Amino acid sequence: MLLGDSITEFGFTSGGFAARLAEAYVRKMDVINRGFGGYNTDLIIPVFEQCFAPQQDEPNAPKVRILVIWFGANDASLPHTPQHVPLERYKANLTALVQAVRSPASPRYSPETCVILMTPPPVQHERWAHGYAAMKGVAVQAPDWDFDMAKMYAEGVVEVGKSEGVPVVDVWTKMWEAAGKDMDKVGEFLFDGLHLNAKGYELVYHALIETIAEKKPEYHYDNLQTVFMNFTDLYADFANHRKLSKKRSAYEKGSLPDPKAGL
Amino acid sequence: MLLGDSITEFGFTSGGFAARLAEAYVRKMDVINRGFGGYNTDLIIPVFEQCFAPQQDEPNAPKVRILVIWFGANDASLPHTPQHVPLERYKANLTALVQAVRSPASPRYSPETCVILMTPPPVQHERWAHGYAAMKGVAVQAPDWDFDMAKMYAEGVVEVGKSEGVPVVDVWTKMWEAAGKDMDKVGEFLFDGLHLNAKGYELVYHALIETIAEKKPEYHYDNLQTVFMNFTDLYADFANHRKLSKKRSAYEKGSLPDPKAGL
C-alpha cells in the first residue's frame, strides 16, 4: 500500500513507481495506490483509518505487507498556504501513522506490515510558481515552497524513522545528490518543479527496492513465490492440477496452500 | 479485475493496459491484475474460484465492478502443445466463467459486476518460433500456432459474448484491421510475435474504454467520483474535514459516505 499525496497518486503514470512495483511484484503482491493529490499528514489520518482495516473487524481482509508513507510536499509548503503543517505537527502525524500499525495497543496493529517512510523530494519552487501561473493564466505569485523548508521536512522524516525504528528512503538526499547538488539539475527528475517524471520515479523505485532488500529481504520480489503455481508445474502433473492450483502464501517458499495468503 | 494469461500478466509493464487503467481509475477503482503466464481456460477455472469471493462468505470483500476475461493465446495453440484447449471446450470454459458471475444460482453471483470478454490478438507464429528458438538456443521447431486457428478462437469469443449477452472487445479484429490485414504490420503491436508492446496495449486500452463507455457508461472513469473527497473541498470546510473525509461510493455522484464502497 502506497500512502501519499499527488506524487503517489501519479505513481501509475508511464514509468511511475507504482507501475514499476506492480510489474515487479505481479502474481506475488498487489500494489494498492492510496495517493491523494493535495493531501498532507493532517488530512490523511482519518482517510488512512478507513483504508487500513483493523484486523479484529476484518480477519479476512488482505494483509498489508509493505506500507510506504510518503508525505511532505504539501506539509512543507510555506505557512501562508492552507496545506502547510508545522514541522512538529508533521512529525507527530507521521509518528501517529507509524504507531497505528506498529503499536500492539492499536486496533490496526499489524506485525506483518513493514512500514517504510520516504522523504519528500527537493522542490524547484520558482519553476513551479511560473508553471502554475502560466497554467492558470495569472500573474506569478510568491512561491509556495522554499529550499530550506523542504530540506527541514525531509530531515524531520529521517528523525521520525530513527525514533520509531522504521526504515527511511531518503528521496530528498538521493535526488539532491544525483543532481550534483545543483537546483537546475534537480529538474531532470521533475516535470513541473514539484512532481516526478519517469526518471524521478526510477530513482525512487530503485531506492525503495534497495531498502526492502536491506531491511526486509523476505518481502523483496525475488524472495517471494507466485501465489498460484507456474503453468509448467501444473502441466507436469495435470491430473492433479486442481489440487496444485490452491492459493499459497507468497511469503513461504515451498509452503502448503494458505487460504489467507495476501491476495 | 483483469483475468487472463501472460498478455494480462505483463499489463503493468511500461505502457501496459493495466497501468493505463490504474492511472485512469486512480482514487476511483483499484486495478487487480490476475494474469497468469501460460494459463488457458482449463487452468484458470479453479484459480478464478479462489480470486473471486462468493458474496455470502465474504460480505465485506471489495466488489469487482468490471471483470475483464482475456484468454485464447494459449488455448488456441496447436493440438500438439500441452496448453491447447479444443475450441468447443474453450467456449464452454469461457461460458462457465461468465455464468459463475452472472447466474443467480451461482455462489459467485454478482449483479454489480460488468463482465467483458476480449478476443486474443493475432499471432505472428513464424516470428515467435524463430525468437523462441534463438532465446533457448535450439533449432527452430514447427510453430505452436497458426493464423486460422487464432482467428477461429477469436470468433469463438464473439459467439460466447452473443449467447451470454456480455460485451466483447474484439482485439483480434481491431488489431488485424489496424495492421491493414498485413501479418508483417501486426508486428507493430507485438514485441515477439505473441506478446503486446506499448502500441498494442494502447490499442487494447482504448478499445476497452470505448466498450465501457458504450455498454456500461456508469463505470467509465469520467462518470465516477473519487472515493475520498478532493483536498480543495476538505479545505473549504476544514473544521469538518474528519466528517467530510468519510469513504463514499465512487458510483453514486454526490452520494452519502458508504462504508462498503469499492475500495
Image (tube, coloured by chain):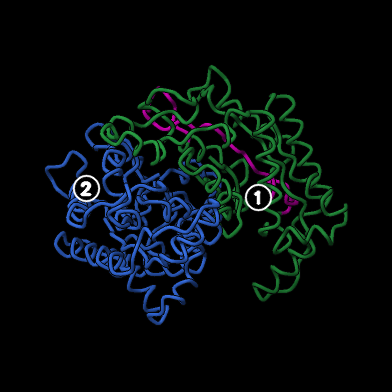
Chain colours: A green, B blue
Residue that extends furthest to the left in the rendered view of this protein: B105
Please state the extent of the stretch shown in magenta in the rendering.
A52-80
The quarter of the displayed image where residue A92 is located: top right
Residue shown at the point (40%, 65%) measured from the top left = B125
| Quarter of the picture holding the C terminus of chain B | top left
Tag of residue A83: 1
The quarter of the displayed image where residue B55 is located: top left
Residue shown at the point (57%, 49%) measured from the top left = A18
- Residue B185 location (% of width, % of height): 46, 77
Foreground of the two, A263 or B196: B196
Q: How would you rate the neighbour count of disc 1 (Cα within 10 Å): few for under 14, some for 14-19, many for 20 or more? A: many
- Residue B86 location (% of width, % of height): 22, 54
Check disc 2 and give the amino acid type: Val
- Residue B193 location (% of width, % of height): 46, 64
Side of A161 where B169 appears, left or right = left
Residue holding disc 2: B101
